[in-house]
Amino acid sequence: MSTDTLNAQRAAAYRRRLTNKQLEAEVFAHATRSIRLADTGSAIDRARAVADNRRLWAAVHATVMDPTNALPAQLRGQIASVALAVVRECETKEPDLAFVAGINEQFASGLWS
């Protein structure tokens, strides 16, 4: 996805006055759409979607491992475990895109509720 498209989506989200959690949910939803489209797209589409998801989950992992993160320690540990599982999956030769999309959807859903 191009930078212009991503910036347009961000601008649209801000105009809708989303909460921070809802904005985070939108990030996961966007990542899920990319993974779902990559399943039928070109090899480059697939590589880009997998790399974007790997970066997303690496950022999630870094965020929950930050000692200043306000989430409860047990929840931070659980999220960190999921993040590492997704990162590992994205680093395999043939990542299971359905697994990655499913995890993304679960997190997006949790953030929306």
Image (tube, rainbow, N blue to C red):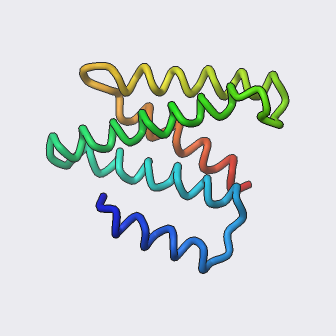
Split into 4 quadrants, where in the image is the N terminus?
A: bottom left
Where's residue 43, x and y in %?
15, 40
Q: Nearer the viewer, residue 21 or 94?
A: 21
**Position of 34 relative to 50 (above/below):** below
Location of the C terminus (image quadrant): bottom right
Q: Is residue 9 above or below residue 38?
A: below
Q: Position of residue 67 (x, y in %)?
A: 77, 26
Residue at position x 42%, y 39% in the image: 53
Depicted 16 relative to depicted 72: above or below: below
Q: How many marks overall? A: 0
Asked if residue 46 lies left or right of residue 31, the reply is left
Q: Residue at x 60, y 30 (%)?
A: 62
Residue 82 image-quadrant placement: top right
Left or right of 70 on screen, residue 1? left
Residue 39: percent from left, percent from top = 26, 43
Quarter occupied by residue 35: top left
42 vs 38, left or right, is: left
Residue 17 placement (x, y as % from top left): 68, 75
Residue 112 falls in image quadrant: bottom right
In the image, is residue 25 above or below residue 93?
A: below
Residue at coordinates 39% horizontally, 53% vertically from top-left? 33
